[in-house]
Image (cartoon, rainbow, N blue to C red):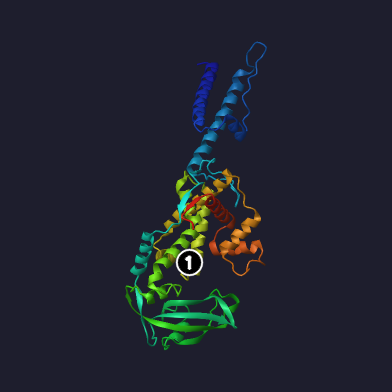
Amino acid sequence: MSEVEKNELDVNEQVETSDAMETEFEKTDIPEEDIQETYDIEPEVTVTDNNGGTPGQGNKTTAIIVALSLAILVGIVVLICFAMGGKSSVNSEAGAAYDFEEAGYVTLGEYKNITVSVEVTDADVKEEKDYILDEDVYQKLDGTAKANDMVCINYKGTCDGNPIEDESAEDVEIQLGDEEIFAEFDQGIVGMNTGDTKTIDVVLPTDSGYGELEGKTAQYEVTLNYICGELVKPELNDEFVTSYTDGECTSLADFDDYLRNELYESNVSSIADDVWEQVVNNATVEKYPDDVLDKAIEETKKNYENFSEMSGYESTSDFLDEFGMTEDDIEDVAKDTAAEKMIAKTIAAKDGLTMNDDVYRNLLVDYMEYENGQADNMSLEDIETEYRESYGEEPRDGMLLEYIKTYVADNAKVEGLK
């Protein structure tokens, strides 16, 4: 075989290889101009001489084909690597609209003119009453509290004459000896008679969440309401109704009306949540961007860690065990959270909604449940810091979700309003 024939055979083989690679690359649906831009490939230009031929056809054609083949091969390798382990991401700014539907991640369903009802039927009242009476209650016994007794108390904590935040409650049932509050607290109740009120001194321990009060002696005013006897089914009478409603209703004859009003108020307060539940159920999540899901999982884990610590559990695992959950369930919760935020951002994008700084701050203050103007002198950064510490997540997307929930609720049809 001559040298010329060998060259022609080599060229033909390279062309066939190039055609096969081009066929594979076409399957990726990537426009040719993007391939050229990504791999710095210049479009092929054919130069002809005066006789219609191509100057230097043999060597130059071979070089072009080889270069193009290598570039396509590199592209295929990159795409295969991406498919096997690449991460998808979106450029979604926190607290801002983003159309996840247009990007192929979600499909919205109906989110306007959602219908909910706040009407309370007789069947609803009966169901609520049956539920209340199905729960066992302790017999209320008189006597002297002993170690290990279950008791019902009222208490109020102060330090240096000032009330301690979140350290007062009524009708709390505790097991003496379990030290649910403090060891000195339980010990001080032992020996008290029902109906007695007593002040118990307690040294607030370090690392207990009391800040500058740690190490100081607090005073707890405690009233022993009763000693808990056996668990029994409650008897529906005036005494039970008065106790159950904290004195808001004192007659069995008025109990149905009381329950009806309570159920109605509950339905009204949950309008936004009920509407949003329908919006989420109407939507479909096709897939999750990796960065969005990774962030949601990280924030959800942090959220559970915070709740575990605040609730006094030694570990997140103990907290999860208490509620019949495992570490694997955290990802499911994270997916639900990510889905809701993606849906909210998409609705904001579709309807041109933006959350300005004033709206954002007001939503954040309401969500943190500050009282008595507590947030008036706080900077936005300080409020955001407290939110992160409490919930383990960035606040802007969370507040956008609340903003959109209110928006769709305002566009809903509510039946049964008085």
The percent coordinates of residue 180 (x first, y second) are 45, 77
Q: Nearer the viewer, residue 87 or 358?
A: 358
Residue 53 occupies quadrant: top right
Q: Nearer the viewer, residue 176 or 4?
A: 176
In this view, 71 is above or below 320? above
Q: Residue at x 55, y 64 (%)?
A: 390
Q: Amino acid at mark 1?
A: Ser
Q: Nearer the viewer, residue 27 or 373?
A: 373
Other-residue count near label 1 (Cα within 10 Å), few / some / many at <14 / 14–19 / ≥20: some
The percent coordinates of residue 23 (x first, y second) are 49, 27
In this view, 367 is above or below 220? above
Direction from residue 77 to residue 127 in the image, left or right: left
Number of marks: 1
Please name the residue that numbered disc 1 is placed on: 308
Q: Residue at x 58, y 44 (%)?
A: 351
Residue furthest to the top = 51
Residue 153 occupies quadrant: bottom left
The percent coordinates of residue 408 (x first, y second) are 53, 50
Q: Is residue 5 visible?
A: yes
Q: Residue at x 66, y 66 (%)?
A: 376
In this view, 278 is above or below 387? above
In this view, 321 is above or below 3? below
Q: Nearer the viewer, residue 231 or 61?
A: 231
The secondary structure type at the circle numbered 1 is helix
Q: Is residue 388 visible?
A: no
The percent coordinates of residue 63 (x first, y second) are 60, 25
